[in-house]
Image (cartoon, rainbow, N blue to C red):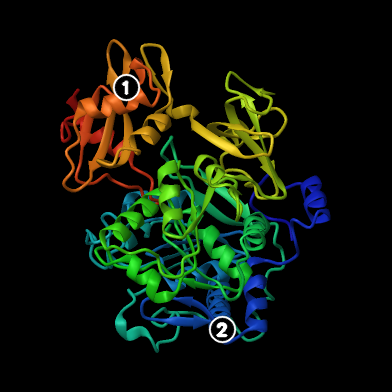
Amino acid sequence: MSSVVLSLLNASLLKEYYARGLWREDTIYAVAAGQADRAPDRVALRDRHRSVTWRELVAAADELAGDFHARGVKPGQRVIFWMPDRIESVVILLACSQAGAVCSPSPHRNHTVAEVQAMAERLGARIFIYQPAFGADARAPARAPGRANAIEEALAGLPTLAHVHRLPAVSAGDGGRPLLDGLELKKPAAGAMPSPSRDPDRVSYIAFTSGSTGQPKGVMHSDNTLLVTARALCRDWKIGPDTIVSTLSPFSHNLGVGAMMTALVAGAELVIHDTPRGESIVDRLVETGVDYLVGVPTHAIDMVAELRRRGMSRLGKVRAFRVSGAASPPKIMRDLMAFGIEPQSGYGMTENNSHQYTRPGDDPELVSQTCGRAIDGYEIRIFDPENPDRMLPAGEVGLVAGRGACLMLGYFDDQRATENAFNRDGWFMTGDLGQVDGAGYLRLTGRQKEVLIRGGHNINPARIEELAAEMPELVRPAVLALPDPRLGERICLAFVPRPGADLKPDALLSHLSARGLSRYELPEFILPLAELPLMANGKIDKPALLRRVADGALVPTAI
């Protein structure tokens, strides 16, 4: 069946990627159903209170897909969920795949009711599933009588919406309860339930970008574009049925969904990250026997700090840690190695998934200094920032671009953004700056839109952050561009001081100068903080910091 959602999918892509074995006939649901056929009683998912077998997982997905059908959800229509990571998140995604619906897990804990309502409206949501009290202001009561809360009130006028499902929070007594218990599920009429969707090439997943560089865009993927990277990771990193996978990145972030796909393809157990704030993630990883971990640099930094604080030499059975989602300081990669963990330095975006990573056994210098090489079926090239149609030779720094089987199918309902994302020859322009060596290993040097311009000089914030992170007195450095009427922008370094450390500004400047920064690249302000605000995907929320500086809530110190 052809997709009713307009996308970049075309006959030539289908022919090429199927011929190369990169795309296959299996949907995401079919992959999970295959695992249930092979090992029905093996544990597929685990949270703090429940464990679910492959048989139970697929049965729950079938039940929810039946509810979608009974409520009139047609193939291609959108289902959104807003909740913390939980077993039902995977059930919803599988049910969408089974029913031919499009799943959007993008609403996260930092979103407000107004933002989620706008997202649902942009997508024309047909079904909305949520956990009460999750979100920045989701505890707000409804203003009008007859509504359960603010989000249900906000969605009440959405003409496309057929139903809102309210999932109760998971509690310690839920171990024996059936999945989806508590939902008012409708059953299709006898004989009316269609067969599971068999189209892995339709648009099946829409994830909104973080919006860190502008208006969030709805990135469209098919089952096949999501599964390509999962299959490659399983092959290259030997992830299989005996592996226990966990992701510290939430399912609202593409990195978290990528880990979910990897576990589904491998038939591995996936440990849901539902550890309450304030409790030890290290203890949870040790307790559950996780051996393949996924997260962002912030997670790695926190993990290493806890291991050192507690005098631990190992992180349980963790053998590999994919660190992606943001530029990784080389030091944190070396720190992980010191604890017997092989880092998988990775690179990817919502638009092209986890297409780039180092391989087991790579030279430690490559692991700490690069983000690896592309998977089979994806290729990257470097282009001139001043002329995106001119390709640069290996070794030169320029715009990172890519194309291949894991690339998105465009931006939902946004023709202009889709057109602007590609150059003349169809290369997707990431906006990141980097260089590729002769072996295909990519070194990121910054981001085109994040280049700070001070007095006409282009300055790379990532380089300053990388060098500042070498200092033992601080963690999580973040360069902010403070507006200046004469120079345009000035450099402020925000950071969290290590407990008991006393960072002298002169020592900071001396270190950065000794490591090669020129005078005009040195910070002119510092901003020590007890903690740095994070986006839901684990990236430092620089826009939030700049807003607090602008309104006077934070005052940088001149140095």
Image coordinates of residue 191 in percent, x first then y, are: 67, 84
Residue at 29%, 62% (x, y): give it.
311
Q: Residue at x 26, y 38 (%)?
A: 495
Residue with the mark numbered 1: 522
Instruction: Residue type at mark 1: give it.
Output: Leu
> In terms of depth relative to the viewer, which is nearer, 190 or 418?
418
On the picture, is 405 further left or further right than 514? right
Q: Position of residue 153 (x, y in %)?
A: 31, 60
Q: Where does the image place residue 456, in percent across and percent down from the top left?
A: 40, 11
Q: Which residue bears the numbered disc 2?
A: 42
Task: Name the quadrant of the N terminus.
Answer: bottom right
Q: Secondary structure at mark 2?
A: loop
Across and down, in percent, residue 466 comes to 40, 35
> Which quadrant holds residue 96?
bottom right
- Horizontal arrangement in the rendering, residue 397 relative to residue 274 (left or right): right
Q: Residue furthest bottom?
A: 176
Inspect this view and state whether residue 47 appears. Answer: no
Neighbor class of circle 1 (other Cα within 10 Å; few <14, some 14-19, many 20+) is some
How many numbered circles does the render carry? 2
User: Amino acid type of disc 2?
Assistant: Arg
* Mark 2 / mark 1, whichever is N-terminal: 2
Q: Which dot, 2 or 1, sits closer to the camera?
A: 1
Does the image show residue 19?
Answer: yes
